[in-house]
Amino acid sequence: NLTELIEFVLLGFADMPHLQWFLFGLFLIIYIIILMSNGTIFLIMIMDPALQSPMYFFLANFSFLEICYVSATLPRMLMNLGTQRRRISLAACATQMCFVFMFAITECLLLAVMAYDRYVAICNPLHYPLVMNHRVCIQLVTGSWIIGIPVMTMQTYQIFSLPFCGSNQINHFFCDVFPILKLACGDTFVIEMLIYIVAVLFAVVPFLLILGSYSKIISIILKLPSATNRAKAFSTCSSHLMVVVLFFGSGSIAYLRPNTRHSEGTDKVLSLFYTVLTPMFNPIIYSLRNKEVVMVLRKLLCK
């Protein structure tokens, strides 16, 4: 006698009705800032001859990724806040989930690639042009973008093959995996284990590779005789480290803790960190701390 669901309701911030228009305005401003700041960085790094090193090639890809990542969640959230129509079809929900986690996997891998780039630049500077040649950079970026596609397509298919019945309300602002699984009628144990395996492979392993790279980098930097050289070497890595801590910190707390400890309110706050706030802070972290990028921006503004 169970009726299979054909759509969900994204509750989002429905528990704060008096703040709906404030939140709409706030997230609209944030979305515009993300598009403009990341878009500007992407364009200047692609077009300016002074920023054609592998590091800036990876940064350009990272900025473009942030635009894609935030566009998978924020437009739907803004529409729900503005119209108060929170319904979303199963197909649209599955598509959103697939893209959100495909871009998340790409971000994890791209951050690991950027750490490897810094490792080669600081630990093997003489071999850097040979190791990080244009072909290798293209291969690393292409791999980061496409590896997550078959993984998340298959996992999304498995999740949405489950029967959904009873409540259709998702207490989240996007189609996140654990709130969706709570609405499934079948046994979700196997799928949850597969989710944790994917999280370990594409989040924990890249994070460990980043830690390994930076342990080597820091040991080399500390051996440099000049304090000026040490400061310069640290400055090229500090921006990347701050982004790693922001993204992996909030993401790991959200997805790698036991399912029994998942609080819906906490999940929403953590999700805002890695889907909205991190893409907004990344251009500030990378641009304002990078003298070459600041100089190029000043040149453009003076024109």
Image (spheres, rainbow, N blue to C red):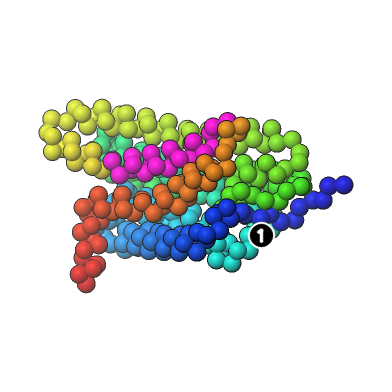
What residue sits right under mark 1 in the picture?
A: 87
Q: Is any part of residue 267 visible from this angle?
A: yes
Residue at (52% x, 41% y) in the render: 266
Magenta residues: mostly which secondary structure? helix
Quadrant location of the C terminus in the rendered image: bottom left
The magenta stretch is 237-258
Query: As drawn, which residue projects farthest toward the right?
Result: 1
Label 1 Cα crowd, 10 Å radius (few <14 / some 14-19 / many 20+): some
Residue at (26% x, 27% y) in the render: 219
Tell me which corner region of the image, top left, top right, bottom left or bottom right, holds residue 239: top left
Q: Position of residue 65 (x, y in %)?
A: 45, 54
* Drawn side of residue 78 relative to residue 189, left or right: left
| 43 up-or-down from 120: above or below | below
Tell me which corner region of the image, top left, top right, bottom left or bottom right, holds residue 163: top right
* Drawn side of residue 105 relative to residue 157, left or right: left
Amino acid beneath label 1: Arg
Residue 238 within the magenta-colored segment of the rendering: yes
Q: Position of residue 62 (x, y in %)?
A: 40, 51
Between 265 and 71, the residue placed more toward the observer is 265
Between 36 and 233, the residue placed more toward the observer is 36
